[in-house]
Image (tube, coloured by chain):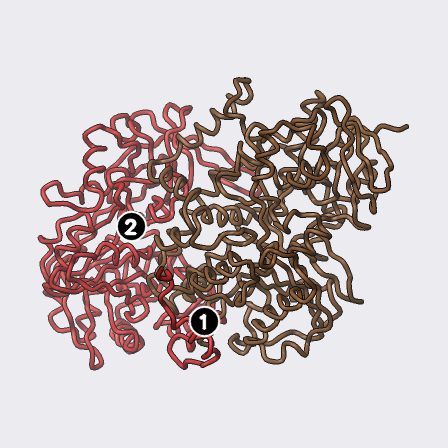
Chain colours: A red, B brown
Amino acid sequence: MISPFTNAALYDANMNRHVKIGSARTLAQSHFRTLRLGTPFQPRIDALALTNDWYNWAGYRAPHSLWDEELEYFAIRSQAALFDISPMSKYRIEGPDAEAYLDRVTLRDVTRLKPGRVHYTAWCDDEGFVLDDGTLFRLSPTRFRLCSQERHLPWLLDSAIGYEVSVEEETEAIAGLALQGPTSFAILRDAGFAGIERLRVFDLADFAHDGAAVTISRTGFTGDLGYELFVPADKALSLWDRLMAAGGLRGIRAIGYTALNRARLEAGLIVANADFTTAGHAIRADRLRMPDEIGVGFMVDPNKGHFNGRRPIFEARAKKQLRHVLVGLEIEGNIPAEHATVYCKKSQEVGLVSAAMWSPMAKRNIAIASLQRPYGDRVVDDLWVEIYALRELRYQKLMKRAKVVPRPFIKLDRRTANPPADF
Amino acid sequence: MKAWDAIVIGGGHNGLVNAGYLQRAGLDVLVVEKNDWVGGAATSRELTPGFLYSNCSYVCSLFRPEIMRDLELPRFGLQVISYEGGAVFTRDGDYLANYRDHDAHRREFARFSKRDAEAYDRYSRDVTRQCRFIQPLLMRTAPDPTSFKPRDLGELLYLGKKFAGLTAEEMALTLRFWTMSISGFLDEYFETDVIKANFALSGIIGTALGPMSPGTAYVLLHHYMGEVDGSVGAWGYARGGMGAVTKALAASFKASGGTIRTGAEVERVLIRNGRAKGVVLAGGEEVHGKLVVSNADVKRTFLKLVEEKELPDIFLRRVRNFKIRGSSGKVNIALDSLPQFPALPKDSPVYRADMHFTDSIERMERAYDDWKAGRWSADPFLDMVIPTTLDPTMAPPAKHFMSCFVQYAPPKIGGRDWTDADRDGFAESVVAQIAEYSPGFRDRIVHMEVRTPREIEAEVGLTEGNIFQGELTFDQLLFNRPVPGYAQYRSPVGGLYMCGSSTHPGGGVMGAPGRNAAAEILRDLAKPTLHMSPAHDVI
């Protein structure tokens, strides 16, 4: 009988213990001393971090605020704000089958995404539950970059079986910046990125920077005029300095997440694991969501071939088994309804607010909420939110009327204007 | 002559939990313990001056917090301290650590495989889902599937509803979990040998099965469903060693009026007209009780303490065939200084965590091959901790207690009993393995306690030295544990109950069998159980 263990090298290896390998692997051991990494921009951000108000973004030390979260928000809406997006998960997907592969794993029709374009998309597990949403950049006919909140390498690799495509995680290798706000275009032009005016919304192009290339796309998470820039990590600081120098006279400011989060809510954009629980993390089965249940059903393309989750998604649609719906709410008054319970007729619990704020741009009290159908879907009358406002150690309980409204909550012409204006 | 309301045989943690609950229900309870100390497999003894060992069990997670609260164990000195992660040393001079920080954990795995680093989230999600399914079953008596009593039907319905509440994918996973090998299960998530070995250890601890044997995936789950103060899956040290658990239980029991007799070995259960009436101690003394609860394992209870003629054939046969195979040993070491591991950075938190040297599933399986051949493993699997890096009470400053759980060690060596020479050879396999990764280790040793299955059985009373009082395979779980038809802590002998880890939900320092048995006994006596706080919600 042949032993199941044909690996005779095992015992030989015993002879060679303590042969230290000076490889990248052993050099990387020291990471345990730095639980929150700095991004490639950290020296610049640290220098501006007057509040020292940090949070953990995917293992990185990221700022909630840098000097004043209110004023940082107004920098987005009035001048230009620089926000470090380096901790986002980034995957480089390349090969002759890259388009077919991505068409198979994501919801939208990737064959219609032209080189030099970006689209917002989402992807599901085999049960049709959303794993994440993110942006897909088509850098060339055969090369893509997928950016997302969560990590997906095992899933992307497993899905690649049978395709001539390579998937590589490049989160650390590539630094990212969002430059958002009315003067963002003028800053890039003044910084010498010739031809930047030709970028329309969701366009991308490579520009020369410091002996390398920076990929600039007209995209963002604010609903405003804005761009995202990706460079090799070792060119990060020179890029930062170039933008800051060019933006000095146009009000450029670095900002933290609190300000950005307000802007994204006004833009009606959702955040994974804040507005819905991703299938990769959901422990309770009833927290799983199909695309139609988090407001991204529009991405599902019935005209394209097989994609992950196709059968269960269309089955749920046909059998009307969709249980939830994500809606924009406008709530009376001005008290933010964050994490408030939503009621029908002030009595029946029908959902939860996941994000809420007083919108300075809309001058309205806005919110994103997940409701149990038919509420928010067919039944939209007589909806209320119960706000527990903690004021000096007492809850002031308010029952406020809520109205389902379309997202985005604000629409800014400057976001899409061509060519973009100076402010 | 005095007749106690209840006599508990064996002062292990389950016996003391059981006695504590019965005493607090108003019964007059006696615990008889053969050793001169209580604790069973949760003891801390000072065998060399200044050093306190955790002689058998050495880490704490499964012990139910409801019990700690009900029996006021903190008041009697129990403190459980979470510890930090762990590591597997690799043969090329590196190591793979587990860090408590989620991102550090991912980065550490990414040193070996970026893919596996990101696969950890899905693995941990799936394991958590399964733990949440099983955890609520721990503190409930398993239903008798053949009974039509409303309570059994209700419990069956509860189980069925819980199962039906799972998604199709989760149901499939549950069945796989209960039947698969841990190696096969890990293959579904990870590709790197050392990462699989890192997780597989929880699937084989205390089990006479290898990582490739079906059924070991469940054993992993059993090690994951504990908690330290709400941090599910975390493990900690009992301050003062695991003996602190039983010390607190004994103090609590005595404070509520209970009586413990140590140095009192039970020779047999006194049975008259098919009913337990007390126990006969070694030396012939009869102690009378209205009921008897055995904390001993099912084999010891029914094959040694009860006469065969008192038991139905089929029950006896099943008890004889109950799998309680010895698979592990223990080496406790007093050290005059902290051992150094050149592979580890000097400031590594791994020194305060559990350490292992088996860096592949194949090596684990080979260690198991030795067990099958009736030998201790030449290249054993060690679960090694140095509790004194966190607990200042167990050794003088700068000196350390090291606990090594060692697998595999068969109950017999080539069919014959262990000898002292075997024991020394077994100890040498352990010391040699550690010394390979820690130069100068031997010179630090002040004292060593070596416990093969022979010593564990002789001292603690665990048949074959099996730490779980019976293997945790699916054929021996729920209403099949220990024997079909007798899974509700009662036995064929009237008034004789079981409360040890041979019963549902099984082994580990959990206390749930002791508590569940107390609930059944009080039910039979029609006594209230208001002093038992309900099992914590799993929401």
Q: Residue at x 57, y 48 (%)?
A: B227
Secondary-structure class at tag 2: strand
The amino acid sitting under disc 2 is Asp
Residue A31's disc is 1
Chain letter for mark 1, please: A
* Closer to us: A221 or A304: A304
Residue B307's spot in the image, x, y percent? 72, 33
Q: Amino acid at mark 1?
A: His
Which picture quadrant has residue B486? top right
The residue depicted at 63 percent of the width and 33 percent of the height is: B516
Which residue is more in the foreground, A33 or A283?
A283
Of the residues under marks 2 and 1, which one precedes in the sequence?
1
Give left or right: position of B69 versus A28.
Answer: right
Mark 1 Cα within 10 Å, few/some/many (few <14, many 20+)?
Answer: some
Name which residue lies at 18% across and 60% down. Answer: A137
In front of the other: B309 or A223? B309
Q: Residue furthest right?
A: B1
Q: Which mark is residue A132?
A: 2
Residue A326 location (% of width, % of height): 29, 38
Kind of element beneath mark 1: helix
- How far is mark 2 from mark 1, CA to CA? 28 Å
User: Where residue A353 sits: x, y (%)?
Assistant: 38, 39
- Residue A187 vs B486, above or below: the answer is below
Circles 2 and 1, Cβ within 8 Å, touching? The answer is no
Q: Position of residue B464 (x, y in %)?
A: 63, 50
- Number of numbered discs visible in the structure rendering: 2
Which chain contains the residue that carries disc 2?
Answer: A
Query: Residue drawn 23% across and 37% down?
Result: A312
Asked whether residue A337 appears in the rendered view, the answer is no
